[in-house]
């Protein structure tokens, strides 16, 4: 999994499903602060800004603080998937896809797609390029986040050209 993979999957979802969210101007993306989507990860920030501009969306990256992954819904989803295969040997791609397609969470099946594209790892921007990225984002601090004064350090806003 890489920064490019994450944004490509998001863009693929948005291309196919944005019709369901016609009135949405801001996406809030809950992030786990992992290595691929960390707010200091230069390639991720570059790509998510490009996504915001391409689809004219404002994006708020909401990062879970360290050791708080239990509150992240995706972690519960992985748990349901692990429970569904219940110790089965998964030795073929098709087997993994079938388990994922057949799982249910809160009465719904996930959208499952096989990605075969190979992504480069270790893609980084120069400090100069990252400086240009930093000028396009707002890192909320405790002093700028009046609504949640103790959580400001965990939010980043990206304006994609929508007011």
Image (cartoon, rainbow, N blue to C red):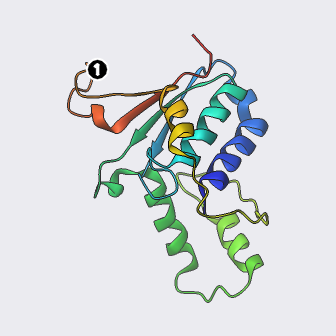
Residue 30 seen: yes
- Residue 35 picture location, percent across and down: 46, 59
The quarter of the displayed image where residue 116 is located: bottom right
Task: Decide: few, some or many residues near mark 1? Use Cα within 10 Å; few <14, some 14-19, many ≥20.
Answer: few
In this rendering, is residue 122 above or below 152? below
The residue sitting at 72% across, 28% down in the picture is 54
Image quarter of the C terminus: top right
Image quarter of the N terminus: bottom right
Residue reaching furthest to the top: 163
In the figure, is residue 161 to the left or right of 136?
right
Q: Which residue is mark 1?
A: 144
Out of 23 and 25, give the one closest to the viewer: 25
Residue 110 seen: no
The quarter of the displayed image where residue 103 is located: bottom right
Circle 1 SS class: loop
Out of 143 and 147, give the one closest to the viewer: 143
The residue sitting at 44% across, 44% down in the picture is 39
In the figure, is residue 138 to the left or right of 45?
left
In this rendering, is residue 41 above or below 92? above
- Residue 140 picture location, percent across and down: 34, 28
The residue sitting at 76% across, 64% down in the picture is 114
- Residue 65 picture location, percent across and down: 30, 48
- Residue 63 picture location, percent across and down: 39, 43
Number of on-image labels:
1
In this rendering, is residue 16 above or below 105? above
In the figure, is residue 102 to the left or right of 62?
right
């Amino acid at each position: 999994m890489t920064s490019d993979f994450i944004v490509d999957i998001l863009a693929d979802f948005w291309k196919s499903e944005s019709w369901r969210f016609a009135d949405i101007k801001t996406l809030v993306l809950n992030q786990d602060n992992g290595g691929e989507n960390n707010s200091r990860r230069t390639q991720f920030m570059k790509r998510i800004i490009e996504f915001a501009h391409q689809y004219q969306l404002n994006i708020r990256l909401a990062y879970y603080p360290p050791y708080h992954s239990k509150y992240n819904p995706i972690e519960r989803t992985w748990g349901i998937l692990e429970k569904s295969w219940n110790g089965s040997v998964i030795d073929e791609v098709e087997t993994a896809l079938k388990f994922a397609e057949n799982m249910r969470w809160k009465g719904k099946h996930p959208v499952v797609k096989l990605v075969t594209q190979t992504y480069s790892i270790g893609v980084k921007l120069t400090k100069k390029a990252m400086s240009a990225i930093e000028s396009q984002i707002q890192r909320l601090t405790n002093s700028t986040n009046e609504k949640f004064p103790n959580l400001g350090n965990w939010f980043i806003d990206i304006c994609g050209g929508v007011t």
